[in-house]
Image: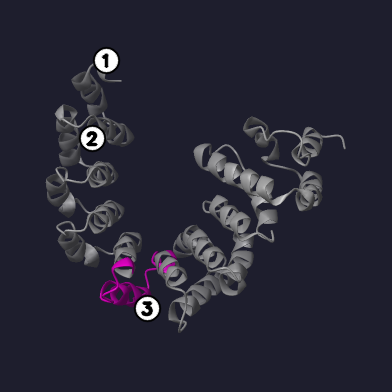
Amino acid sequence: MSSVVERYLEELSDPGKPLVTSKLVYLSLMNPAEVCAFREVWRAIDLPRRQKVVGRLADMAEDNLQLDFEEVFRVCLKDPDEQVRVKALEGLSDCEDGSLVEPIIDLLQNDPSDSVRAAAATSLNNFVLLAELGKLRACEAAGLEAALLAVINKSGEDSDVRRCAIEAISSLSKPVVKEIIREAYQSGNPTLQISAIYAMGRNCDAAWLGLLVKELESPDAERRFEAVGACGELGDPEVVPYLRKAIDDPDIEVRLAVVTALGAIGGSEVRQILLRLGGHLDERVRLAARDALAVLKTDSEVLFEDKWGEGDE
């Protein structure tokens, strides 16, 4: 074997050598010959090491968008271990290659593990959005919608798999999807209702605003958190006054979500709110507001930085 990748594979497959995370970057953007070599080596690596490798690769891909382990994750979709398959699906969550739709649907429909099937549904989130934007081939989009609908409507389906499928399909602006979200919200099942609140944001329909504003007052912090995130996804300035009130939510995760949602909505009113948060008592809120304002990329950013002073870094 001649390439750096192929030489590294010898080390990776040796159980006597430690797994060095920094060297895993060699598995990014492998060429066809290297992928073939990786596939052969992967079969011989013991299970605990395979689990560690795919887990670290998924984390690295999330932290560094320059790294591309898609080919590794494709191989891992067929791994006999369900934990490896789950991590591979997580690693593919931001992929836009339509050729992955079919193998992921196959896992969604046929994998014996409910955990894998739930992860498969979640990993289809991005592809559903691409379908809604017309960036997926018609046959792929149709197959995607049909597969998710089949899971959602299947009698006796695992609750987590069904919940993840509802979240995944929610980006489609179709009447049947809106009805699915509404039925989940009215189901009386708290877990399903939380997924419905999340789905309302992904559905991007202002018709959900009334329910989301109501959920901002929920006694349940998780429902408030999802409602705040959904408001940010919708991006409607009408919710800004309600989010401004929620900045004093007793739950820190909700407070930070409010700041992020405000930054996503933007506008002059939001800029003023974020500037005022420079004097908030909670440092985490102050820093989150700074980050949110920076994303807006306005002239107010300089004023905001001056408000903090150099000692708050």
- Residue 173 included in the magenta stretch of the image: yes
Query: Which SS does the magenta portion mostly show?
Result: helix
* Dot 1 and dot 2 residues touching (CB under 8 Å): no
Q: Earlier in the sequence, mark 3 or mark 2?
A: 3
Q: Residue at x 56, y 45 (%)?
A: 58
Task: Find the distance from the CA under tag 1 to the CA under tag 2.
Answer: 17 Å
Q: Position of residue 199 (x, y in %)?
A: 34, 64
Image height of 21 relative to 167, above or below = above
Q: Is residue 311 left or right of residue 279?
A: right
Marking on residue 176: 3
Image height of 74 relative to 152, above or below = above
Image height of 234 relative to 69, above or below = below
Q: Position of residue 207 (x, y in %)?
A: 23, 67
What amino acid is labelled 2 in the image?
Answer: Val
Q: Residue at x 16, y 46 (%)?
A: 249
Q: Is residue 304 left or right of residue 26?
A: left
Closer-to-camera residue (10/122): 10
Q: Is residue 15 left or right of residue 159?
A: right
Closer-to-camera residue (258/234): 258
Asked where in the image residue 205 lies, by quadrant, the reply is bottom left
What amino acid is labelled 1 in the image?
Answer: Glu
- Residue 2 included in the magenta stretch of the image: no
Q: Residue at x 78, y 39 (%)?
A: 14
Q: Which residue is mark 2?
A: 285
Q: Is residue 20 visible?
A: yes
Task: Find the distance from the CA under tag 1 to the CA under tag 3.
Answer: 53 Å
Q: Which residue is mark 1?
A: 310
Q: Position of residue 248 (x, y in %)?
A: 14, 43
Segment tinted magenta in the rendering: 168-191
Residue found at the very far bottom of the displayed protein: 155
